[in-house]
Image (cartoon, helix red, strand yellow):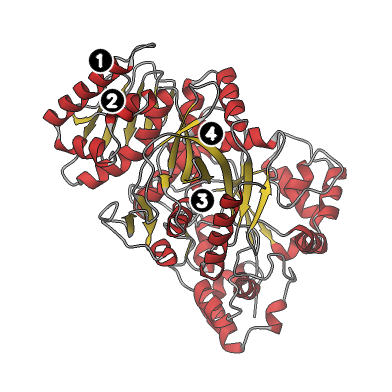
């Protein structure tokens, strides 16, 4: 939403239900089918995974246009050694990281069950996969929270900038400027537009926009997509045992990025 | 056996029979493909149906590695103005040439069911585009002599909704791909298409539909026969519906103005095929023609069990009401 508002050429806030500057999500089934000319819903999970790098290659094959793509998947090498996200056609990665204790709370509400034990289990499961073969999105292998972080930040094939969600909340303008400078060194960052984007993308405004017209990415099972957006809300929800399960599994990665229980 | 413009129906009949006979002699499978979906008398078929049937003649045979004069190439397909090549990840390959039909190479581990599955998808779509018909990514039912087509990307719930509408008495026109014939200047005709719906286990459960065989041995996805019967003759397009699943309750909103044009283009099946072989101005004309052919509605409904029947009832009532 920040990028959508930054690149928005009008003075109006970006409509949260309209496509912004990002070219959809990497797991788009429609794009897979279009780029490769076949029905992904007739393929096995392994066949889909093996063909996905070709989708990204096709996206960049016929023009030098840059694409911002939202990604859920962990980066990984496939059975034949190719990367899921091919370094040759990937520009940079902006890795948005958040305290896994808050992620667990957010996940419990997002999945509509508010069962924090269940959310912690999902976050600590190194086999966690989003969507399935019959879903509108392709299956996305996430792994556990720490596995996912490591898959992206410790690979050295694609340049990575790590953005802590908590830092984004504290100084949105500064972080957005850094992201733009990292991703688009070829253009000068427009600070006035950065300020406009930060102003139009506050959590309160996103919440109000969702209340007003709904949000297309809200799962049916959830009450709302933009719920609270605060840092540290886990203290209001997680039991000590749940906190310990995440810390035990990923304490080292948490410490590395300044998170502690 | 190349089809020429102005060919008469009797010539088409002879052509079609020759192709089918030739195909039968070479491959029993193609006879299943050609004949298995057709219960409608040949004499009553329109020219478009005969052309498509002839062009879909399928036999085992050599498949080239590449196409000369390809207009677009991807690792999985190539298309030129008269040919199409499809390479599946399981090693199955198809080659279509206009006026000749389709050959395929089938690795030992690939089943005949898989040949039919992929033939009826992208190959069928490419054949339609290359013969100047317009395939939409849509499942369609019939009411009161007109076709109501529900379009959306894979996974949007087209087949599931078609199955639910079958349970409510609407006969099926086509599942997944609906081919339009624009040759009549006075109307856009929908051609009868695939009649075996492809449903995942959860969709079978939702719709209470009985599963037939698996579409592929590796997938928990099954063919299912429509419970509301089928239609085997072309009919005009009555309404085009665009599926989404944003809201908490089913809604139907009329689509007007320029959005009709952009929505139409989004409904094309395999748009990269037609982009590659069609001049931009012709593409514009096709989209314009289809966008003017029938009213359009955005059909938004929640997915999942809780509201499924309500949403299907809502769609059925809208079709019967015949207005916005």
In the image, residue B201 sits, relative to residue B157, either above or below, namely below
Q: Earlier in the sequence, mark 4 or mark 3?
A: 3
Q: Earlier in the sequence, mark 2 or mark 1?
A: 1
In the image, residue B3 sits, relative to residue A86, either above or below, namely above
| Location of residue B206 (image quadrant) | bottom left
Front position among marks 1 and 3: 1
Q: Secondary structure at mark 1?
A: loop
In the image, residue B35 sits, relative to residue A225, either above or below, namely above
Which chain hosts label 3?
A: A
Q: Are marks 2 and 1 in contact (CB under 8 Å)?
A: yes
The quadrant of the rendering that contains the N terminus of chain B is top left
Q: Secondary structure at mark 3?
A: loop
Q: Nearer the viewer, residue B231 or B85?
A: B231
Residue B1 marker: 1
In the image, residue B156 sits, relative to residue B51, either above or below, namely below
How much space separates mark 4 and mark 1, taking CA atoms? Answer: 40 Å
- Across and down, in percent, residue A206 comes to 78, 60
Provide the residue designation for mark 2. B54
Front position among marks 2 and 3: 2
How much space separates mark 1 and mark 3, taking CA atoms? Answer: 43 Å
- Across and down, in percent, residue A194 comes to 82, 47
Provide the residue designation for mark 4. A60
Residue A27 marker: 3
């Amino acid at each position: 939403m920040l990028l959508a508002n930054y690149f928005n050429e009008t003075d109006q806030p970006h409509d949260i239900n309209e496509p912004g500057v990002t070219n959809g999500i990497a797991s788009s089934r429609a794009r897979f089918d279009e780029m490769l000319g076949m029905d992904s819903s007739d393929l096995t999970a392994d066949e889909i995974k093996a063909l996905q790098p070709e989708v990204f290659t096709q996206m960049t094959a016929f023009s030098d246009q840059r694409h911002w793509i939202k990604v859920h998947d962990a980066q990984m090498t496939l059975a034949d050694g190719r990367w899921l996200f091919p370094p040759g056609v990937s520009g940079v990665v902006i890795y948005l990281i958040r305290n896994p204790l808050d992620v667990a709370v957010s996940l419990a509400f997002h999945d509509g069950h508010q069962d924090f034990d269940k959310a912690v289990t999902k976050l600590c499961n190194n086999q966690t996969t989003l969507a399935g073969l019959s879903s509108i999105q392709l299956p996305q292998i996430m792994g556990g929270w720490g596995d996912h972080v490591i898959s992206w930040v410790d690979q050295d094939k694609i340049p990575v900038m790590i953005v802590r969600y908590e830092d984004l909340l504290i100084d949105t303008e500064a972080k957005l400027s850094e992201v733009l400078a990292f991703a688009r060194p070829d253009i000068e960052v427009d600070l006035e537009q950065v300020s406009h984007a930060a102003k139009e993308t506050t959590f309160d405004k996103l919440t109000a926009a969702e209340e007003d017209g709904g949000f297309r990415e809200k799962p049916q099972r959830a009450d709302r997509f933009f719920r609270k957006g605060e840092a540290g809300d886990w203290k209001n929800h997680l039991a000590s045992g749940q906190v310990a399960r995440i810390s035990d599994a990923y304490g080292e990665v948490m410490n590395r990025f300044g998170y502690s229980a | 056996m190349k089809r020429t413009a102005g060919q008469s129906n009797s010539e088409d009949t002879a052509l079609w029979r020759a192709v089918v006979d030739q195909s039968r002699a070479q491959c029993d499978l193609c006879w299943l493909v050609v004949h298995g979906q057709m219960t409608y008398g040949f004499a009553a078929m329109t020219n478009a149906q005969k052309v498509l049937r002839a062009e879909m003649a399928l036999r085992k045979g050599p498949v080239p590695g590449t196409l000369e004069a390809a207009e677009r190439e991807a690792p999985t397909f190539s298309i030129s103005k008269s040919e199409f090549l499809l390479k599946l990840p399981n090693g199955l390959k198809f080659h279509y040439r206009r006026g000749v039909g389709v050959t395929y190479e089938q690795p030992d581990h690939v089943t005949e069911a898989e040949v039919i599955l992929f033939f009826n998808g992208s190959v069928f779509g490419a054949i339609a585009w290359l013969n100047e018909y317009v395939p939409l990514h849509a499942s369609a039912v019939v009411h009161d002599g007109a076709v109501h087509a529900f379009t959306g990307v894979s996974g949007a719930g087209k087949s599931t909704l078609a199955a639910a509408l079958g349970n409510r008495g609407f006969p099926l026109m086509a599942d997944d791909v609906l081919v339009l014939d624009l040759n009549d200047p006075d109307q856009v005709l929908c051609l009868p298409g695939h009649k075996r719906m492809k449903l995942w286990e959860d969709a079978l459960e939702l719709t209470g539909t009985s599963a037939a065989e698996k579409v592929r041995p590796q997938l928990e996805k099954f063919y299912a026969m429509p419970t509301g019967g089928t239609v085997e003759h072309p009919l005009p397009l009555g309404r085009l519906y665009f599926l989404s699943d944003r809201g908490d309750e089913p809604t139907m909103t009329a689509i007007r103005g320029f959005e009709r044009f952009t929505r139409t283009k989004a409904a094309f099946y395999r748009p990269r095929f037609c982009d590659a072989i069609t001049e931009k101005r012709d593409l514009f004309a096709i989209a314009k023609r289809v966008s003017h052919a029938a009213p359009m509605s955005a059909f938004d409904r929640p997915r999942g069990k809780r509201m499924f029947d309500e949403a299907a009832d809502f769609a059925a009532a809208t079709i019967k009401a015949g207005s916005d």
